[in-house]
Structures are given as structure tokens and as C-alpha cells.
Amino acid sequence: MNNNNNMNNTNNNEINKNNSIDLFDWGLTDSFHELYKSNHSDLHLGRVIFESKNLYKIVAEEGELIGEIKGLINLHATGREDFPAVGDWVVMDRGSNKTGNAIIMDILERKSMIKRRVAGNRLDTQIIASNVDYIFICIALNGDFNLRRLERYLSIVWDSMATPVVILTKADLCDDVDEKISEVESIALGVDIHATSAINDIGTEIINSYLGSGKTGTFIGSSGVGKSTLINNLIGHQHLETNGLRNDDKGRHTTTHRELLSLPGGGVVIDTPGMRAIQVLDIDESINHAFEDVEALMLQCKFSDCNHHTEPGCAIKRALKTGELSESRYANYLQLKKETEYLRRKMDKKAAGEYSQHFVKQTISRRKAKKFFKNAK
Ligand code: GDP
Ligand code: ZN
């Protein structure tokens, strides 16, 4: 199903016509409300819950609306940062008869932004999510535990102006939780650290305690550490397919596309493909790490730009011949590289605004990579 067509085909743009929505359930705070009241009270306030090509799904008091960009923002935009992102508070003109798409007139000043640099015509900044209060950095206490990776995640969070909270997942699979917590403490001074276990249902309440009314959280961390499991537990039902704990609730994807989810306790969780894709860069690094031997061989090739096909003096070909490097290991390496390259290109394409949204949802590579690492052990 193509999300974008789905949005375009929505003739009646008022999805929940009769539901009056309390925006405070969607993370509205007094300060955003004030900002709106004092500058834009003639317009409609809403929060972006989904983005696809230049259309936005927005939750507003009168229900969910489709918003588009016209005029002002286009005119003044100097880069991707000037366009709405999931989490943004926007003000909209709905015209006198309130039919057709709402026109997004302005974005209320963001209090935090999770960004990534993207290669386009020039280096541009893509906003992955905005107005996030807490970023839960998830690191699993089994094989995933890696302080260098945590440092990278922390730097993303510090850049965003959100507050990091370290979540050490899968405590049930670890014998020395306290020791791991002190290791984390040593590099994450002053940061809250919690160990969780989905198996023993430990952690949901702790995370919930951060996400009271007006608070917005999001999750980062490698594939398979348990982010979907935590999010599902927070919202109290299966929103996301986890890699293992599936249920047969066929209705789970029939809700309208939302990447910003309102929690029963009043807070909000943002879960976008972009947030998930932060880990792609991480997977790429893990590949290099897991295949240090292959990378080391490549450094020994006679030509620095060796393609390892027909070039003379190729260390890879030599190692394959002698058996020092197995054909299957090398094939796996190439496959994973190809997949992460593909994902990366897709991400950059999206950033250039040319790409429809659903690829990371499929997360084929994520699964494959995970499966592969399992098999490689
Ligand atoms: P994501 O890729 O980060 O969203 O990870 P998932 O939520 O899909 O979880 C990946 C796998 O780890 C699934 O098989 C989960 O059932 C499992 N998992 C998640 N949390 C825990 C935990 O606390 N303990 C254990 N033992 N397994 C967990
Ligand atoms: Zn070579």
C-alpha cells in the first residue's frame, strides 16, 4: 500500500469529523499554546503526525487533517529545515468553508530538533523529529552493549536539545547489570540510566513516568534492542510488529498513518522511519567492525581503489584463493554493504523530497543484517 496515494485519495480531508480532539493529549504545552494564542489565534493549531512528499497529516482540534505547504513557507524556505517535520506545531489556514486541504502557514519555533546531514545538491539538514523532550537511547545488555556506540547516540541527543535517557534493555539476559550501569555512568555523566526487561515487564512504568502530559519522547538504538517492544508496551497494544513477539491482531495496521502516538498516560511517542534509520549508519559501522579482517585485507590490495575483481595484487582475491577468507563470509560482507548503501541512498533521496515514505518500515535490511549477525557468530 502506498502511503502517499493513500493520502492523496482522501477526498474528505476531515478524517474524524465529529471528534473534537484535546491537543494537550498530543503533547501541547502551555508555552506552545501561548505562542499560538498571541501570534496566530486567527489560524488553526495542529501537530504534524505524518509526513509524505509535501503532504502532512496533522492532528488538530477538529480531527485529523491533511495539510499542504503553499505560499509563505515555500517562498522563504532556504533549506529542508524550513519545512514541517513530525512533531512540529503548525498553524493552518482552513479557508472559510473548511474544505480541501489545510494550508500550513507557519511552524511554531521548535524547542528541539533531531537532525541529520544529507547529501543533496548541497549539504542540507533534514529534521527527523521535532519538539522531543526525551530521547531514550536503547542499548541491549546482551551482545549490543557498546560504549562507543552510546557516545555517538549521546552526541546526537545533545545536538538536538532533547534530554537523553539511557535504557539498558534485556536485563534478563545479563548477569552483571550493576557493573554495566556503572560503565555507562562513566561516560554519561548526569544522564538517567535504567535497566529494563520486557520478559519481566520491567521498564514500561519507568519510561511512562517521563512521558506525562505535554511530554514527547522518541527512541534510538540498534535494530533488535527492543524499541518496538517498549513502544508497544507503552501504548498498551501492538502498534508495531516486533521481530519476535508477533500477535495475530489483524487490525494493527488499519489505523491511519501516524508516526506520533498519543499514550494513555498523556504523553506522546514519535516513531518515524527516519528515527529508525539513524541506526542504518550504525549498522554500517557494525559491519565494518564485524568484518575487520575483510577490511584489513582490502587495505593490503596493491591499488587503493581496487575493485577486487581483475586487478593485479588484490589481497582479497589472494585470500579467497588460499582459503584465508571464505567465499561465503566475503559474499555476506558484500551483500550487507550493498544493502546499507541502498538504504543510505534511499534516505538521501527522501531528504531530497523525491521518495515515498514506506521503505524503512519494511526494514528488510535491518532484519537481514540481524539474521546475518546471528548466523555469523
Ligand atoms: P527493535 O528492532 O529495537 O524494535 O526491537 P524489537 O522490539 O523488535 O525486539 C527485538 C527482539 O528482542 C524481539 O524478539 C523481542 O521479543 C526481544 N526483546 C525485546 N525486549 C526484550 C527483553 O527485555 N528481553 C528479552 N530477552 N528479549 C527482548
Ligand atoms: Zn583488491
Image: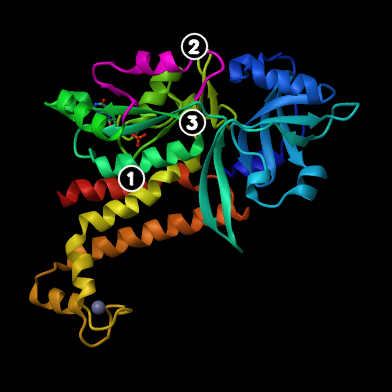
Cα distance between the residues tagged 1 and 2: 31 Å
Percent of width and height locating residue 20: 71, 13
Judge the density around disc 3: few (<14), some (14-19), many (≥20) Cα neighbours within 10 Å: many
For image coordinates 82% across by 34% down, the residue present is 100
Q: Earlier in the sequence, mark 1 or mark 2?
A: 2
| Residue on which disc 2 sits | 265
For image coordinates 31% across by 37% down, the residue present is 224
Indicate the secondary structure of the residue bearing disc 2: loop
**Apparent side of residue 208 relative to residue 356 in the rendered image (left or right):** left
Indicate the secondary structure of the residue bearing disc 1: helix
Q: Which residues are magenta?
A: 189-216
Where residue 13 sits, quadrant-wise, is top right
Point out which mark residue 367 bears.
Answer: 1
| Residue on which disc 3 sits | 162
Percent of width and height locating residue 332: 25, 60
Quadrant where the N terminus lies?
A: top right
Cα distance between the residues tagged 3 and 1: 29 Å
Image depth: mark 3 or mark 1 in front: 3
* Three-letter amino acid code at the position of disc 3: Ala
The way the protein has been coloured in the rendering is rainbow
Percent of width and height locating residue 245: 31, 28
* Three-letter amino acid code at the position of disc 2: Gly
Cα distance between the residues tagged 2 and 3: 20 Å
Q: Is residue 253 visible?
A: yes
Q: Residue furthest bottom?
A: 312
* Three-letter amino acid code at the position of disc 1: Arg
Q: Residue furthest right?
A: 96
Q: Looking at the image, which is closer to me, 5 or 216?
A: 216
Q: Earlier in the sequence, mark 3 or mark 1?
A: 3
